[in-house]
Amino acid sequence: MEHKKTFFSVTKETKHGTVYVEGPVPPEKLAAYSFHEGLVAFRPPKQQQKAIIDIAGLPEGRIVIIRKEDTIVGYVTYLYPDPLERWAEDRIDNMIELGAIEVIPEYRGTGAGKALLAVSFMGDEMEDYLVITTEYYWHWDLKGTGLNVWDYRKMMEKMMSSAGFEYFATDDPEITSHPANCLMAREGKRVSTETMERFDKLRFRNRFMY
């Protein structure tokens, strides 16, 4: 499959000034920007910047960012599922995963997350993809937001649904290990029935239980 990457850039006004929401951003551009020290949800900032540069260099990898001038203050990543996860057991060419979405605390509540998702799906090529995301409560910043696990889950569902993601049931043990965890996916308009059937087989190993 050819992974087309059409660049979009949107100007957004926030209480902290003008920011640009744009992508997919190529590796060389990501390397030229500074990475805000508040982006610490997954790795130390320098390591996470290297990780998103590496993802952007993958054929299927897509990085959409929010930047204030030359500083990245938020990002979302898309790539093939981790080889160690169930979702990679059948390598579906047009199934990619929203791997991480992060915004610095100062920009939360400004619509930054929704803006990242909106720009992510501006390209018509995204209608060829099934995009999945696995939400685990242990990745959520409950302390920083002051939300309990259920309110955070509602916030995540609302944000994801703004871009067309829907809830999908699964018997994956990591997801079923806590009732707040969930699997969501966005089915592009041109995704085939075959792709969805293969996705269904990945979702359920113990189909007799459902």
Image (cartoon, grey):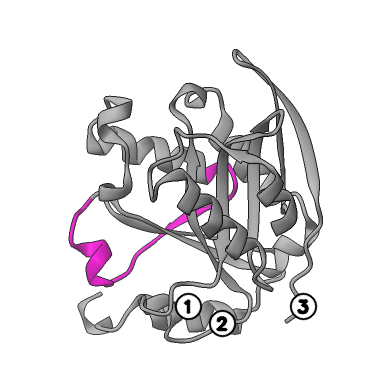
Rendered image quadrant of residue 14: top right
Horizontal side of 111 relative to 136 (left or right) equals right
Residue 83: x and y in percent read 42, 79
Foreground mark, 2 or 1, reads: 2
Foreground mark, 1 or 3, reads: 3
**Observer-nearest residue: 170 or 152?**
152
Rendered image quadrant of residue 72: top right
Asked if labels 1 and 2 touch by Cβ distance under 8 angstroms, the answer is: yes
User: Dot 2 corresponds to which residue?
Assistant: 92
**Observer-nearest residue: 69 or 7?**
69
25 lies above or below 68: below
Horizontal side of 49 relative to 10 (left or right) equals left
Residue flagged by tag 3: what amino acid is it? Glu
Mark positioned earlier in the residue sequence (1 or 3): 3
Q: Is residue 69 visible?
A: yes
Question: Residue visible at 28% across and 72% down?
Answer: 172
- Circle 2: is it few (<14), some (14-19), or many (20+) Cα within 10 Å? some
Residue flagged by tag 1: what amino acid is it? Phe
User: Dot 3 corresponds to which residue?
Assistant: 2
Total numbered labels: 3
Q: Magenta stretch: residue 26 in it?
A: no
Residue extending furthest toward the top: 15
Q: Which residues are magenta?
A: 161-179
Question: Residue visible at 29% across and 32% down?
Answer: 151
Mark 1 → mark 3, Cα distance in angstroms: 20 Å
Q: Which mark is residue 199?
A: 1
Q: Magenta stretch: residue 174 in it?
A: yes
98 lies above or below 148: below
**Disc 3 on helix, strand or loop?**
loop
